[in-house]
């Protein structure tokens, strides 16, 4: 219910179309290494995720391979990923809510929800499908906490926005494609939970 409500807000947001393309890579200092990216037995391959992305994003999937290849070039193979939908909006301060499914290699699938605030020079709203690659998740329970990220560090690859969140060596790389418009730079965090909640803190 909350997601449908926020989608309606984002669809009727003022469409200020602006694309912020950052030339610097926010993970330039992270190299694919034994600490970033798993083996073939305990992680997902690039081909697996591209195939999943094409099915999930449908007609909007044209550039998903480029986005995934960009992340793989720096971080290697993830051992988990999340697919779902989210909505967000901001007038200086903002909120984001989402829900989806966490898939862990050899660990099955489970529901996951995320929500969080942001603050900064920001205006607009958007609803999007999201596919997030997750690295160094040794056990599912470690996902359920808050992860900081700078939205302004997001960059565009093949029409998809990509940004990065990190905590205690666990890295989450959301890939988003959606409708609406966001203008600005903001800092915030996302809290991942087992059950839905309106409380973003």
Image (tube, helix red, strand yellow):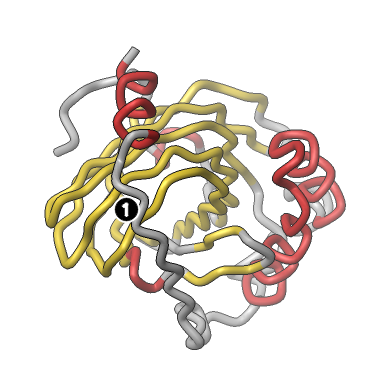
Residue drawn at (29%, 59%), measured in percent from left and top? 148
Residue 33 vertical placement versus 108 (above, below):
below
From the image, which quarter does the N terminus lie in?
top left
Residue drawn at (56%, 56%), measured in percent from left and top? 135
User: Helix or strand or loop: what does disc 1 sit on?
Assistant: strand
Residue 27 vertical placement versus 172 (above, below):
below
Q: Determine whether, in the image, residue 200 is placed left or right of residue 157.
A: left
Residue occupied by mark 1: 147
Residue drawn at (24%, 64%), measured in percent from left and top? 186
Q: Residue furthest top?
A: 1
How crowded pointer 1 is (Cα within 10 Å; few <14, some 14-19, many 20+) is rated as many
Q: Is residue 142 visible?
A: yes
Q: Position of residue 61 (x, y in %)?
A: 74, 47
Could you tell me how many numbered marks the image carries? 1
In the figure, residue 31 lies in which quadrant? Answer: bottom right
In the figure, residue 108 lies in which quadrant? Answer: top right
- The residue nearer to you, when weighing 180 against 77, is 180
In the figure, residue 184 lies in which quadrant? Answer: bottom left
Q: Position of residue 107 (x, y in %)?
A: 66, 30
Q: Is residue 145 visible?
A: no
- The residue nearer to you, when weighing 53 against 29, is 53
Residue 23 vertical placement versus 148 (above, below):
below
Q: Position of residue 191 (x, y in %)?
A: 29, 41
Residue drawn at (78%, 59%), measured in percent from left and top? 65
Q: Determine whether, in the image, residue 123 is placed left or right of residue 82.
A: left
Residue 21 vertical placement versus 197 (above, below):
below
From the image, which quarter does the C terminus lie in?
top left
Q: Determine whether, in the image, residue 108 is placed left or right of residue 146.
A: right
């Amino acid at each position: 219910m909350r997601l449908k409500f926020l989608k309606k807000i984002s669809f009727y947001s003022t469409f200020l179309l602006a694309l912020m393309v950052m030339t610097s890579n926010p993970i330039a200092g992270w190299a694919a290494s034994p600490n970033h990216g798993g083996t073939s037995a305990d992680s997902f391959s690039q081909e697996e995720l591209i195939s999943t992305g094409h099915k999930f994003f449908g007609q909007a999937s044209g550039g998903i391979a480029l986005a995934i290849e960009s992340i793989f070039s720096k971080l290697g193979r993830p051992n988990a990923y999340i697919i779902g939908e989210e909505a967000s909006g901001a007038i200086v301060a903002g909120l984001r809510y989402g829900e989806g499914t966490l898939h862990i290699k050899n660990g099955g699938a489970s529901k996951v929800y995320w929500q969080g605030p942001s603050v900064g020079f920001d205006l607009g709203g958007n609803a999007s499908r999201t596919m997030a690659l997750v690295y160094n998740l040794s056990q599912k329970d470690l996902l359920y906490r808050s992860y900081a990220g700078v939205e302004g560090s997001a960059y565009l690859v093949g029409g998809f926005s990509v940004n990065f969140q990190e905590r205690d060596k666990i890295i989450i790389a959301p890939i988003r494609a959606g409708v609406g418009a966001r203008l600005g730079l903001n800092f915030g965090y996302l809290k991942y939970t087992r059950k839905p909640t309106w409380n973003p803190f």
